[in-house]
Amino acid sequence: MEDGIEQLVPAVEQQLTSPETPYVGETYQRLLQDPEIDEAEAKLMIALCLADESERMVDEDREFDIARYRTLLTLLPKLPG
């Protein structure tokens, strides 16, 4: 699964600069306030949330749920399980 998560990092990086997803940048900046979390780890945490919602979308045969994704982001640094 780790390889799959790392493949989502470019998507996270795009979301960090997109005006359509300011909440991703806000989450990123919030995570970086923790001295134990570096930039790469913060991006991986966000990627894990993206992967979790993407997997749920496929499993449930539905559209991407932005509200659920945003909720997962607010729960970081606790990771979805």
Image: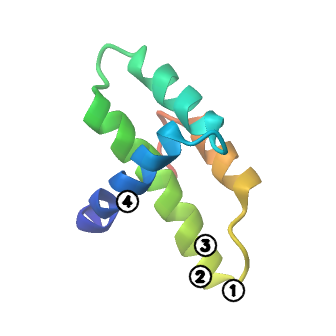
Q: Distance between the residues labelled 1 and 4?
A: 20 Å
Identify the element where label 1 is drawn.
loop
User: Label 2: how many residues lie within 10 Å, few (<14), some (14-19) or many (20+)?
Assistant: few
Q: Residue 56 carries which label?
A: 3
Give x and y (percent) for residue 58.
59, 82
Looking at the rendered image, the disc whose residue lies closer to the viewer, 4 or 3, is 4
Which of the two discs, 4 and 2, labels the residue nearer the N terminus? 4
In the picture of the structure, the residue carrying the numbered disc 2 is 58
Q: How far apart are marks 4 and 2 (CA)?
A: 16 Å
User: Label 1: how many residues lie within 10 Å, few (<14), some (14-19) or many (20+)?
Assistant: few
Q: What residue type is labelled 2?
A: Val
The residue positioned 34% from the left and 52% from the top of the image is 9
In the picture of the structure, the residue carrying the numbered disc 4 is 8
Q: How many marks?
A: 4
Q: In which quarter of the image is the N terminus?
A: bottom left
Left or right relative to 58: residue 5: left
> Are the residues at dot 1 and dot 2 in contact (C-beta closer than 8 Å)?
yes
Q: Which amino acid does label 3 sit on?
A: Arg
Residue 81 can be seen, yes or no: no
Q: What residue type is labelled 1?
A: Asp
